[in-house]
Image (cartoon, rainbow, N blue to C red):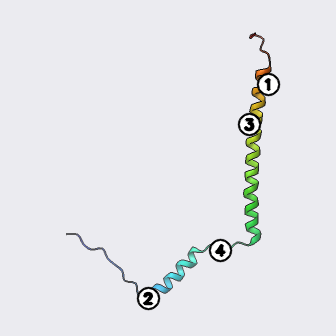
Amino acid sequence: MATKPNVKVIKRRERAPQETQETAAEQPAKKSAQETAREMVATVTGWVSEFQQKRRAETRQALNTLFNDATPQPGKA
């Protein structure tokens, strides 16, 4: 026969302190406006640098392809 799982009864007096502890643990510490702005600037700066690196790599590859195709090869006519 299967046994019933244990059920814990929580009374109102016991529940109130538990709820306040949970809400205090869930809320992260508030950041100042300056810290928030710094994070946003760092994020955007990262995006810009990634975009620039990608663009440089694509440009380098395009130029190499262009000049390799335009250079006459001595064995090919």
Identify whether 48 is placed above or below 7.
above
Q: Do the residues labelled 3 and 2 touch (CB within 8 Å)?
A: no
Q: Is mark 3 on a helix, strand or loop?
A: helix
Q: Name the residue under label 4.
A: 29
Screen quadrant of the C terminus: top right
Q: Which of marks 3 and 1 is nearer the N terminus?
A: 3
Distance from Cα at disc 3 to Cα at disc 1 = 14 Å
Q: Nearer the viewer, mark 3 or mark 2?
A: 3
Sequence-first disc among 4 and 1: 4
Q: Which residue is drawn at 77% across and 69% down?
A: 34
Asked if residue 74 lies left or right of residue 4, the reply is right
Task: Measure the C-alpha gap from mark 2 to mark 1.
Answer: 79 Å
Check disc 1 and report the residue beneath it. Answer: 67
Q: Name the residue under label 2.
A: 12
Q: Do the residues labelled 4 and 2 touch (CB within 8 Å)?
A: no
The number of callouts visible is: 4
Q: How far across and down, in percent of the image, does residue 16 sit?
A: 49, 86
